[in-house]
Image (cartoon, rainbow, N blue to C red):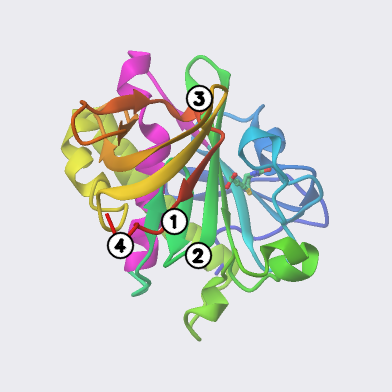
Amino acid sequence: MNSSEKQGDDSTLPVMWENWKVVTLTETSSTNEAARDYDAWTAVVAEKQTVGRGRHGRAWASGPGGLWCSLVLPTPGKPEQWEALPLAVGLSVIRTLAAMDVDARMRWPNDIMVNDRKLAGLLLERYAPDCVVAGIGINLTNSPAEEDPGLESIAIRLADLTPAVPAVDDFLIRLLGRVHEVHQQVSETGIEPLITELNQMWGSLPRPVELHTPEGVIKGDFQGINTQGNLLLKRDPESDSTEFCAAHVSQLIECTPNLTD
Ligand code: BTN
């Protein structure tokens, strides 16, 4: 397709696709860094990242063959309206995959999973008051385990799930349409109408989890999210759920249910 052609080795010359400006780079440190100075509705995509970043300072393996992109999204009006934008972006990834018959789910707050393996991750960062950079990394035909053997039993690629893996720029175009769609939904009606759909994305609920927080590890049953996108955790059957925001939880570990309980 010609909608996001490279203009040269390290070109940042944009190509327009519908409402998006697509900037394609051969290599960059992190597309989130590269995107920070662009206007809203710019998508920066790189064939390779040398310092791909995950949440909480973790590294993100970003060799050739995966989709590494950062989308600059406008967030006008009240900040509360956009609190759950990371989850809405996750929903757009799930919808893109569902249209390819790939049954993915989310692991709160930002992981896209197929069964118990991670297919994709999101990193949303705000550099300006009126927009957010939504970094999206999706394993397509890249080899995460060759880059980091620790990912062997954790990561999965689209190529492991279907023989019909779209080209990176084709996947990007499909994703951009979905991101625009959820952004419009959130800007018109807020996140509330999407909460039911979002709460169907976690797989079976309640789900026993461990949350890694500055106060230590907290165990309980994940009940879904509230309208701020915060996690609801039931720590014991008698108490009400406690709310946790994503910034407070460095890691969520899904636990196998104790069948003797
Ligand atoms: C995570 O799972 O912790 C988030 C991973 C986010 C990776 C993407 S790849 C494109 C963008 N650029 C980065 O450096 N990170 C995000």
Residue assigned mark 2? 171
Q: Is mark 3 within 8 Å of ligand 1?
A: no
Q: Secondary structure at mark 2?
A: helix
Mark 3: amino acid: His
Judged from the image, the secondary structure of the residue bearing numbered disc 1 is helix
- Residue at mark 2 to residue at mark 4: CA–CA distance: 40 Å
Instruction: Point out the tag, 1 or 3, that comes first from the N-terminus.
Output: 1
Residue 198: image x %, image y %?
27, 45
Q: Which residue is mark 1?
A: 175
* Mark 4: amino acid: Leu
Quarter the N terminus occupies = bottom right
Q: Is residue 20 magenta?
A: no
* Disc nearest the viewer among 4 and 1: 4
Q: The magenta stretch spans which residues?
A: 72-98
Characterize the local packing of mark 3: few (<14), some (14-19) or many (20 or more) Cα atoms within 10 angstroms.
few
Is 85 on the left-hand or right-hand side of 151?
Answer: left
* Rendering coords of residue 88 (x, y %): 35, 41
Q: Is residue 90 magenta?
A: yes
For residue 29, what is the image quadrant? top right
Residue depicted at 57% across the width and 72% down the height: 167
**Whole-number angstrom distance, CA of label 1 to CA of label 3:** 29 Å
Q: Are marks 2 and 4 in contact (CB under 8 Å)?
A: no
Q: Main secondary structure of the magenta part?
A: helix
Q: Is residue 240 left or right of residue 110?
A: left
- Of 107 and 196, which appears nearest the observer? 107
x and y, in percent, of residue 257 in the image: 34, 57
- Asked if disc 4 and disc 3 are in contact, CB closer than 8 Å, the reply is no
Reading the image, the residue beneath label 4 is 259
Q: Amino acid at mark 2?
A: Phe
Vertical order, 31 against 145 (above or below): above
- Residue labelled with disc 3: 248
